[in-house]
Image (cartoon, rainbow, N blue to C red):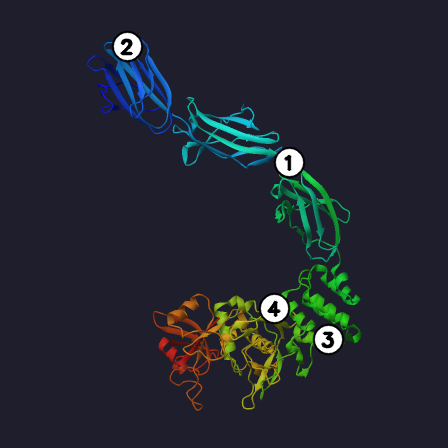
Amino acid sequence: MLTNSGGDNSLSTAKGLNITPTTKTFADYVGVLDANDYYSFTLSGRSSFNLGLDGLSADADVAILNSTGELIASSTQRGTTAEIINTDLDSGSFYIHVYSHVGEAVYNLSLSANSAPSSLQFNTSKSSYKTGESVSLASAWVYDKNGYSDLSKIDFWLQKDGGAWQDISDATSFTAYSGDANWGGFTYDLSGLSIGKYQLWATAYDASGAFSNSVQKEFSVVENIKPSSLQFNISKSTYTPGETVSLTDAWVYDGNGFSDLSKVDVWLQKDGGAWQDISDATSFTPYSGDANWGGFNYSLANLAIGNYQLWAVAYDSSGTYSDSVQKGFSIGDWFDQNIQDASLRVEGRSRFADGSLDRNDMIAIFTDAKDGSVVDATELTDLRTLVSNTSYIAIPDYVRVLSNKIANGNTANAYYQGGALGNLYAGSSDTHLENLINKWFRGSDRPTAPSGFTMTYEYNSGSLFGSDGTFSYTDIIQGYLGDCYFLAALGANAVQRPSTISNMFIDNGDGTFTVRLYGQNGGTVTTAADYVTVDRYLPTNVSDGIYSGQIFANYDNANVGLWVGLAEKAYSQFAEQGLTQSIAESNGYVPNSYGSIETGWSFRVMPSISGINGGYYSDINYTNFGNYLGSFLSLSDIASKIASGVAIVGGTIAKPSDNSPDVDPKSGIVYSHEYIILSADTTTGMLTMYNPWADTSAETGDNAGYKTISYNDFKTYFNLVQVA
């Protein structure tokens, strides 16, 4: 019990009290000398307020006043009968007035206030429901300052079509909001409602009976109209293996709107067997003229050959369903449908039994077309059909590319082994077709020697990447051919992108290799991956009439392997297609010759190796030269590009005069030459490079092709930094 030394005697001097849910008691008296005691208190929210005045020694009364002193409630029992006031008060400031009625009255004043629930809120999950659907509340919460566990119930009432209100079941279970346990969440559902317009009214109560604001929401229950008029067609009656079966004009009607549709349940039967429940259509779009019509997309892929029945029925969200629709279609044999020549059809189908056509399969199919010693129009059409089909006929990319050059033609088909050939045509001889097969699949159209040179080809049995199966830019040694730019580009990719080199070659296992290259123009990649085939025969005994016994790019049957020589040979063959920087002759043709790849620039060959666009940095923007990227790079820029994996090559200036030596005697730098840039050290200011010759000017600091120079000397002797 709290003892008050005396309540103050006016509103302005009222004694302030802190009212809590726990009852507090004050002892005091009023009488002749102290006829009035005033107390003040504040409520932060609507509360159930309880006041008791007892223990009276004489008659005294009590009243509750608002903040301006106006009477709210009072108790005026006679004599010493206890005075009691229980009332609900909104938030605000209030006064308690205890006053003497007769004589001196000692009293005990007991006070408590329980905060009433507040901020009741909820929505119905939607405004309109169908018969059979449950009406659910969403975002349903109520606040109780005394904690969510103080909540007792949400009292619900329901009115239909403006009729009498019905007291319906209450929500009595609450869960605390994770961020504030004064908020209590609840769930509530109504089911079994008939068609009509409804009002749902609710208020929240706590354990003391205090109540919250009321909330009223309206919704309607309408008739559930089942889906109807399901319709669709299959895009065609017969498909080839690998084709996608697609539905067209696929619609279904729902009188409750397209959004009421749940799914189109689809089943499939093959060759009269068991029905299989397959994936459903679950996404619908409204028809622009009537949103009760829902359109849908549906397709089937990877079906085997056979006769099929497709059955479907539409469902709405309440589970009612439409009429069913059944359509038939077939998956036929692709070769029966597309290959007209009987022999090619049999050969193709047999070769395709494993689901793909590899290199040997395509060689066999092309060979089959030579029957009768001539390729007729039907066979030519069939070959082109086979090669061009990508939806069903699986062919490795390199095999398809090479096959396309045979079936559909290529610039390089103009010549074969130095003689005229031409593209395949209706009426081509079997020899013509065999030469095309040899050119593209067997590597038999080997590059000729440069003008004024002689050479012989020698078979090499060594491994692609040598006996240890590894490769390095140090395998590169430029031979008796002016293609330092190509070898520097090859080496730069070996340094920065070793996977480019390892994935560049396919060993066909029959003494040939397929080599991947890309077309380019001025440093910009112009084609997807392209391919040529080279055999194991590489140049030897090269002679220009002065020196003999030479080779071109380095190769051996030991540690180095064949990869550098094969790449150089492949690039020579590739040039014949007009997709490199090689200059065509007056007839517009680039010969299949090593001479076609003499002289050039790395930034225009690195794209052919990696498939990544290239360009050059220089203080001079050369006219019609290619992709100019900006002024000569700083040392730090070079270091940054190397660190980021860019292949980078330096090109040197021309020699001062025709009479000057090819190698600068002071620096040991080769004029009009290209070096692989290996590193750039911003701390020491030095660059380390590799010369494709692999051995120059030891007296000026070279060691097995390595050259380390200052950046200042680099700017003096080099005028191009080439990247890709």
Give amino acid for label 2: Asp
Disc 1 designates what residue?
224
Q: Quadrant of residue 413?
A: bottom right
- Quadrant of the drawing holding the N terminus: top left
Residue sitting farthest toward the top: 79
For residue 59, the mark is 2
Q: Quadrant of residue 111?
A: top left
User: At numbered mark 2, what does the secondary structure look like: helix, strand or loop?
Assistant: loop
From mark 1 to mark 3, how far is it between C-alphas?
A: 67 Å
In front: 413, or 563? 413
Closer mark to the observer between disc 3 and disc 4: 3
Closer mark to the observer between disc 4 and disc 1: 1
User: At numbered mark 4, what does the secondary structure look like: helix, strand or loop?
Assistant: strand
Disc 3 designates what residue?
425
Evaluate whether residue 364 shows in this view.
no
Residue at left offset 39%, top offset 86%:
665
Evaluate whether residue 246 shows in this view.
yes
For residue 153, the mark is none
Q: Position of residue 597 (x, y in %)?
A: 55, 80
User: At numbered mark 1, what does the secondary structure look like: helix, strand or loop?
Assistant: loop
Give amino acid for label 3: Tyr
Q: Earlier in the sequence, mark 2 or mark 3?
A: 2
Q: Earlier in the sequence, mark 1 or mark 3?
A: 1
From mark 3 to mark 4, how far is it between C-alphas?
A: 29 Å
From mark 1 to mark 2, how far is it between C-alphas?
A: 70 Å
